[in-house]
Image (spheres, rainbow, N blue to C red):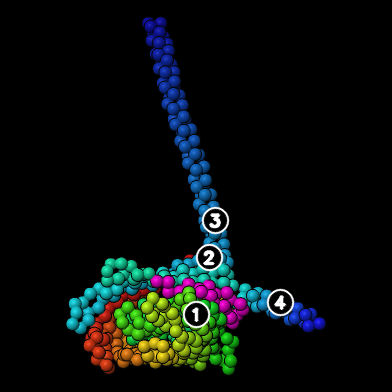
Amino acid sequence: MKGIIAGIALGSVVVSTLLAEQHNVSDVKELRQEVDELKGMISELQRQQESTVYTEDSDTDIFIESKIRSELESNAKSGFLLTGYASFDWVDKQGEDNEFSGVKFAPIFHYQYGNLFQFEGELEFKATEDGEVETELEYAAGTLFLNDYMGIQMGKFLSPLGQYVQNVHPAWINKLPSNPIGFGHDGAAPTSNVGIALRGGLPKVIDIRSNYVMFVSNAPTFGIADDGDVVIDASGKTTSSDVSKTFGGRFAINPVPGMEIGASAAIGEVAEEITVGADTSNIVRDYEVYGFDVMYNVNGFDFKGELIQQDIGENSASTLEGGKWRAWYTQVSYQFSSFKVEPVLRYSDYHNPEKERNQWALGLNYLFANNVIAKLAYEYNTDENDDASNANDNRVLAQFAFGF
Amino acid sequence: MKNLLKCKMLSLLFIMGLSTLTMADEIKADSVNGAQVWSDTCMRCHNLREPADLSKRAWKYSMQHMRVRAGLTGKETQDVLAFILKSKTKEDSQ
């Protein structure tokens, strides 16, 4: 019996040992599997960590590189910038259907080399009634700064005579949707010159700042335009038409903060093209320009005023009369500090040997931002000669303009 | 003797010319004066552009443009630029 019990016990031990061994073997296998899995996970984590470290390094490199690049760019002497302005117009003219009357885009390219040289050029693109695009080089001039008070400007530049043409005409600056009469193309105010100018600011004298421009440029031309009007074409040309060049300038002072008073003058000759039979020649007339302008901005009020006059001498060889092309305007506007609305009132007057016109314009602007403006205006036009043209027609104008 | 005098005069003019060219790059900006010029000058023609309106880079070019248009001296231009860049906050410091 004892033997049987001992045998069973021994058998159980052997079996249990075998089972235990078998169990141990399976545990070890599982453990090995687990260890292998863990090793795999660790390797994966290591790989991930390594790649993470690499990415951080890469981000840091990119960050540092962009910062250095930014610093270098901001410290670079040479570079360029594209700015400009654009406008979209609507008009409702007395006796005519209203229409979307204008789309204008005027990009301005600036190039600069340190404080030594600057170039700027403005192209003007306009959509026309025929669906075409009218392109014009408004100006393209480089300025070499000779010292703190003088730069020499070369190329085509906006007329320095007066203020409106050179500083106020861009749509986002002009406080009304239209130009004062006589201050547009072929009016009384010269628009641009091709030549050389010396210009700059002067040192303060008795705490008064001042600035100047002196220029020599090709002469304007005189004659009959496509619409039949007798005009002085005082936009910059690359020929002087064998007549004397125009010599002129403007001097302005800033007697109190926010104010500028300027006086302009120019002298020279204009060329008038005469055609006799198959022969074309130029005849010469005397040419003079006078201008006076005032600007004053104080306590939200903005006052602007300007008078400009071009005188054309007589020449008996021509059937066209000379005379005075004179325009002036005065404008007041007010910007509220609490809300972004700006009322504007302007009176302008234009006289030449054939025309005598004046205009009242009342406008209201909404400033989405100081350079993003919606304008609405009413123009009351009077033609003193009442020459059956549509110059007497009043207009409602709207414009959306922005500078960038 | 006259030729020597001419040479001296020309040399003097040349040196003066060079010195004026150098002056253009050696202007130290004063942001306090810049603030004064900015408030006295800009709104005569157009609405004020806030420092945040343009990037630092754009302001550099715009101020050279205004130097020509507004008849500023080189120093006034640098002063206004210094004031504008100093007025830019961290949020608009690009």
Q: Residue B62 got which mark?
A: none
The boundaries of the magenta stretch are A136-157
* Mark in front: 4 vs 1: 1
Amino acid type at mark 3: Glu
Query: Do pointers 4 and 2 mark residues of a single chain?
Result: no
Residue A99 visible somewhere in the drawing: yes
Residue type indicated by callout 1: Asp
* Residue annotated with mark 3: A65
Number of marks present in the image shown: 4
Residue B58 image position (x, y, % from top left): 48, 69
User: Crowding at label 4, few (<14), some or many (≥20) Cα neighbours within 10 Å?
Assistant: few
**Residue depth check, mark 1 versus mark 3: number of the one nearer the observer:** 1
Q: Position of residue B44 (x, y in %)?
A: 44, 85
* Disc number lying in front (1 or 2): 1
Query: Pointer 4: what residue?
Result: B15
At x 54%, y 78%, the residue is: A196
Label 4 – label 2 distance at C-alpha: 29 Å
Q: CA distance from mark 1 to mark 3?
A: 58 Å
What chain letter is assigned to the residue under label 2? A
Give the residue displayed 62% in from the left and 73% down from the top: B25
Which residue matches tag 1? A242
Give the crowd class for mark 3: few <14, some 14-19, many >=20 residues within 10 Å: few
Of helix, strand and loop, which mostly describes the magenta segment? strand
Distance in Å between CA atoms under marks 4 and 1: 38 Å
